[in-house]
């Protein structure tokens, strides 16, 4: 997969979830079988805002030429998606989310592998 394609997919996913988490977190969390409280609402809204920032970074950097800055962006998204993959997998295995949680796990795994591939030695990041 090309870098630009991966970044566009990342931007689309963030666009799909970010505003929803920011503005209607209760609805989004209920889709995953979770109840909302004040702490969950705050956390979901902050995460939604973060996803909007990630969307902008992914979209605006989609045409970045190979450089130290582009490598830093790849590292950022790789670590973020890998950490989220581990965290959400643990929550899913603990029964915090319904079956829809597996979809989130697949998304984080996709991006972890996708960005991880660009970190391999001699990997073209075009």
Image: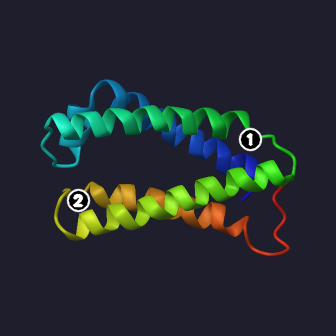
Residue furthest bottom as drawn: 121
The image shows residue 105, relative to residue 67, as above or below, that is: below
Front-lying residue, 84 or 92: 84
Q: Residue at x 15, y 39 (%)?
A: 36
Image quarter (top left, top right, bottom left or bottom right) of the C terminus: bottom right
Q: Which mark is residue 62?
A: 1
Image point 74% across, 46% down: which residue? Answer: 4
Task: Say left or right for 49 vs 42.
Answer: right
Which residue lies under the disc numbered 2? 99
- Residue 26, percent from left and from top: 20, 33
In primary-sequence order, the first of circles 1 and 2 is 1
State whether residue 76 is above or below residue 15.
below
> Tag 2, which secondary structure?
loop
Q: Nearer the viewer, residue 112 or 43?
A: 43
Outermost residue, top direction?
A: 23
Q: Determine the residue positioned at 61% across, 32% down.
A: 56
């Amino acid at each position: 997969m090309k870098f630009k394609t991966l970044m566009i997919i990342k931007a689309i996913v963030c666009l799909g979830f970010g505003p929803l988490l920011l503005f209607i977190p209760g609805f989004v969390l209920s889709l995953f079988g979770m109840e909302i409280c004040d702490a969950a609402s705050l956390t979901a809204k902050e995460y939604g805002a973060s996803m909007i920032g990630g969307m902008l970074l992914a979209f605006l950097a989609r045409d970045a030429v190979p450089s130290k800055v582009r490598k830093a962006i790849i590292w950022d998204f790789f670590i973020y998606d890998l950490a989220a993959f581990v965290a959400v997998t643990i929550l899913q295995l603990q029964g915090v989310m319904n079956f829809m949680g597996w979809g989130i796990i697949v998304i984080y795994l996709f991006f972890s592998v996708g960005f991880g591939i660009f970190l391999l030695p001699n990997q073209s990041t075009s």
